[in-house]
Amino acid sequence: MINWKLYVTALLLPLALGWNSCSRPDVEYFQADEGAGTSFNYAAGAMNGKVYTGGYFKGTYLPVGYNSNGMVAPVPGAVRVMDATSDDQHLQLSETDSTGKLLQTWFFEGTAKQVGSIGHGAQTNEVDSYDGIKAMLDDNHLSVKMGFRQQLTLPDGTTLDSAYMANGDARLNTNEQVQLMIKLDVSKAAGIGPGTTGWYKILDEDHPGYVIVRAADGDANGNMILSYKGCDSFNATKVVVTTGWRGTTTTVGEPYDCAEYLTCLASGDGSTVWRKQLPEGVVLDRCRATVDGSFFCGFNMAQAFEADFGNGVVAPSEIDATRVNLVGQSTTGAGLIKYNSMGEALWVKRGPDSGWSVQGSSSTLSVSRDGTLLAMTGPVVDGRGNRAKTQVSRIDTSNDLTKDVLWTDIIPSGSHGFRGMEVMRGAGQPEDEVVAMGQIYAGWLTLTDDQNATMTLRSIGQYDVFVVAYDATTGAGKWAMDGGSDEVGDSGTGDYFFAFTADAVSGDIYVGGGVYSGPSKFRWGDLQRDNVMHDAQTIKSSGTSPPHAFLVNLKSVSSHHPECLNSCDEAVGVHESNVNDGYCYIDRYCYKDGTSSPYVGHHCYSCNSTADKLEFTAPEGGRRPTGAGRNVVPGFCFIDGVCYDDNEHESYNKNKPVDPCNKCDTASPDVWTAVNGCLLAMEFVGAPDPDGIIRNGMCEATNFEGGIRYNKDGSVNPVGWELEATAAGWGPLSCGSGQTPAQQSTAAALRQRRVMKVAEGEQWWP
């Protein structure tokens, strides 16, 4: 699980009048698992004023809510106490009401132990993070997509074994998770089985080689719509080497005779109503149903050929690479297709006027119940295949003729782009909206809407969540909301979010994921609560803590202005005259005089309403941080736009540790001060080869404490452990590409030894 903390806060720039700076969405409650162990919410679905979350847990599962009235204890029967010392990975589906109270939980007890990193890579047992839970349009059931290994006991007591297929035959392919589809009856404690209208389904009776479900949703009649890949055969002896961004893996066995399918499972028992094989090369990534039985699917396909979906519906081969997102050196294209209730294609959209994209698990699709409001998200990929930006687009589905792209908003991708998106149209919404959730790393993220109005999100850490809303008619930005805590640590301490859903009928938005031990408090909107898992030792360290499931409920509208504003006109934004004396209003949060800035590297500034009501102020005698090298604040260093305490070491980005060899020395407050005896400035010197590359030079260090110099021939007054390296012909601080691999490794080891000895307080200079 990546777990660097980023606290994002919405900052309305003066010219961005399309974005609301006068208020923020109401936060109804948040909920955190406070049990001993670990847990995570990977998926969510909402209906009837309740939210349903799903994920894994180990140990005690004890989600506690918190709203404006205080703590909300769970129903005792919804809590589960398991062995926190065991690595058995269990799954849960949970129901929470509008106050944040956990009402009931459906538990799936596993026997398989987690292998590798929880949350990253292949998971032992999991609720899918993209299509794991969908509220069926009959408003009584959930469509749930799971995967498991070894044995899994369902809420009704049924035990499934991954070694066997649904018909009892031995499973040929044991390399992969078993895909499990569940129709959950939320009105019953068992959820599935006798006495309920729920069921489970394993799609291997026709595909013994392999099955992976791509997308799932439920229609108004309680039927389940699935897209999946099915393989009919399995080669048990073939050795397969796979290389990806997580490294290289070798497995024995490979499925073959594979195809992509679209199918409908019957409401009553999960039997197959119909099944369609898709054109070769087409993958349906996301499918969403509407109340009339029709449904929409986003797809990927190769550019080089046309795809015949049947019923006279053909996707052309032509595609405009300048407007449609292309992934992997322009080898794939995206599209949208509409089907009727019998799985017959009605129309397909793909081509020069698309202006939007779908790409694998990074994309989302959402449609209103009546099918007339549809939006999609996907990455914007440059010519080299880099996903530098992400976009959300609304497509006109008000009839079956136009299918035009009405607007597109593009933002920097941050860490993952948009991880979730929903359209909002219903009784709980005063106007149609498109809401989305994303995560970004430390820094600034500027959102630019279709009207060129901007909203900038700035961070106080490394990693966190934001939620944004757009006007569904115009694409104009409405608001952006940060995920909150007071954490300012560098790593292993923050939040990580996957689950996102919304209920247009009630106007509720839900974000779910996991939280860690770094934040001392959780702060969302006006709600604050101590983090019972907080460990001060994890702040600014490389350590991590087990994640605990987290859920927050937002309203897309605000019922009141923040308490420090006496008035505010959303058409013109906030001015100092709108802010009460004794307060600052910064990034849509109120701060009393004297309150320190929460932003990492900005903690030497505070609210001083006399000086500035709309931004934090430097302490008396200091100067505002407007540029490195000119921004001295008494008692601190200010380097590269960041405040550091005296003797504090340089903090690298999320992928690197704290630098032990550079520190803040307030005697030189605008530059880093080298730690005596630590890493020294080195220069690789020598005669270059004809191509200009120095391959036979040596490292030379000069001007350091003690007056010792490593000469070009490697000579020095060596002591102890340096003798062997010097005798071998290179100095202990040798560097450069001209060194042999052995020399480079030895040099790196010696440099590390030097750091270690300095850290131990040993004076080793002769």
Image (spheres, rainbow, N blue to C red):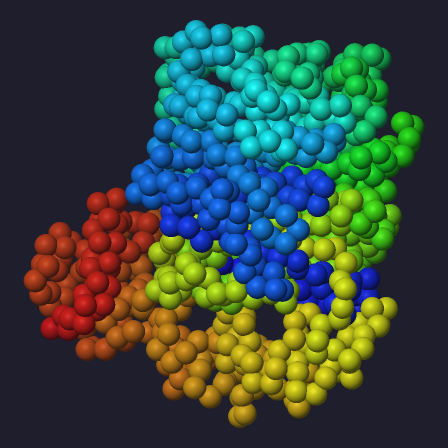
The quarter of the picture where the C terminus appears is bottom left
Q: Is residue 83 left or right of residue 508?
A: left
Going 56% across and 47% down the picture, which residue do you hit?
Answer: 102
Q: Total of numbered circles in the picture?
A: 0
Going 83% across and 47% down the picture, which residue do you hit?
Answer: 427
Q: Quadrant of residue 424?
A: top right
Q: Is residue 414 above or below residue 182?
A: below
Going 71% across and 72% down the picture, which residue do you hit?
Answer: 562
Q: Quadrant of residue 66?
A: bottom right
Q: Is residue 560 above or below residue 46?
A: below
The one nearer the camera, 481 or 37, is 37
Q: Is residue 622 left or right of residue 396?
A: left
Residue 438 placement (x, y as % from top left): 62, 50
Going 50% across and 25% down the picture, which residue do you hit?
Answer: 156
Q: Is residue 704 left or right of residue 669?
A: left
Residue 250 placement (x, y as % from top left): 37, 24
- Is residue 235 visible in the rendered image? The answer is no
The one nearer the camera, 609 or 71, is 71
The one nearer the camera, 661 or 142, is 142
Q: Is residue 734 left or right of residue 617?
A: left
- Is residue 588 visible in the rendered image? The answer is yes
The quarter of the picture where the N terminus appears is top left
